[in-house]
């Protein structure tokens, strides 16, 4: 069982930066693919970024590529999402996610564990 707790959300202005963090419990963390998803009001939950168990492979949605960076620290059981040049359309609840295997996929159906989410609001 893996429990995920997000932190770092808040209200920022367009163009600002923000770092989200996810703390994971359990000894299996270092073997699992991890990711971030988001859900805006009235929209479906969508893929943002994933990172392989060893941190060597990452994947990003086109909408955030070049602005967001996902990273992980297996010694601390954490995964971060550093967000630059935030836009109003980045406003959403951001969820940390863990796969059941070493590589996380873009599909929400492949997520084995979810955090409760953290709100990010970007004002114009």
Image (tube, rainbow, N blue to C red):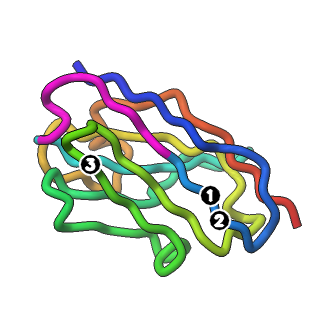
Ranked by sequence position, the earlier of labels 2 and 3 is: 2
Residue at 67%, 41% in the rendered image:
119
Q: Is residue 66 placed above or below 119 in the rendered structure?
A: below
Q: Is residue 27 magenta?
A: yes
Pick the residue in front: 11 or 36. 11
Disc 3: which residue: 73
Q: Which residues make up the magenta segment?
A: 21-30
Disc 1: which residue: 18
Please provide percent x and percent y for residue 29.
19, 35
Label 2 element class: loop
Pick the residue in front: 71 or 109. 71
Dividing the picture into quarters, in which one does residue 30 lie?
Answer: top left
The reply to whether dot 2 and dot 3 touch (C-beta < 8 Å) is no
Q: Is residue 124 magenta?
A: no
Q: Is residue 31 left or right of residue 63?
A: left
Task: Name the quadrant of the N terminus.
Answer: top left
Please provide percent x and percent y for residue 27.
14, 26
Label 3 element class: strand
* Farthest-out residue, bottom: 66
Please provide percent x and percent y for residue 118.
60, 37
Q: Is residue 51 placed above or below 40 in the rendered structure?
A: below
Q: Is residue 106 left or right of residue 119?
A: left
The reply to whether dot 2 and dot 1 touch (C-beta < 8 Å) is yes
Residue 17, numbered label = 2
Task: Name the quadrant of the C terminus.
Answer: bottom right
Residue at 50%, 53% in the rendered image:
46
Q: Is residue 48 left or right of residue 84?
A: left
Ranked by sequence position, the earlier of labels 1 and 3 is: 1
- Report how far apart the C-alphas of labels 2 and 3 lie in the structure: 20 Å
């Amino acid at each position: 069982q893996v429990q995920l707790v997000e932190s770092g959300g808040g209200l920022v202005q367009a163009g600002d930066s923000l770092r989200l963090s996810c703390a994971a419990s359990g000894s299996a963390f270092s073997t699992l693919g991890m990711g971030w998803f988001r859900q805006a009001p009235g929209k479906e939950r969508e893929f943002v970024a994933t990172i392989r168990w060893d941190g060597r492979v990452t994947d990003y949605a086109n909408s955030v590529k070049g602005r967001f960076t996902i990273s992980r620290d297996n010694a601390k059981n954490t995964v971060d999402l550093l967000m630059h040049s935030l836009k109003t359309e980045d406003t959403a609840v951001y969820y940390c996610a863990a796969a059941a295997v070493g590589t996380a996929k873009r599909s929400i159906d492949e997520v084995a564990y979810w955090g409760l989410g953290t709100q990010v609001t970007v004002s114009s």
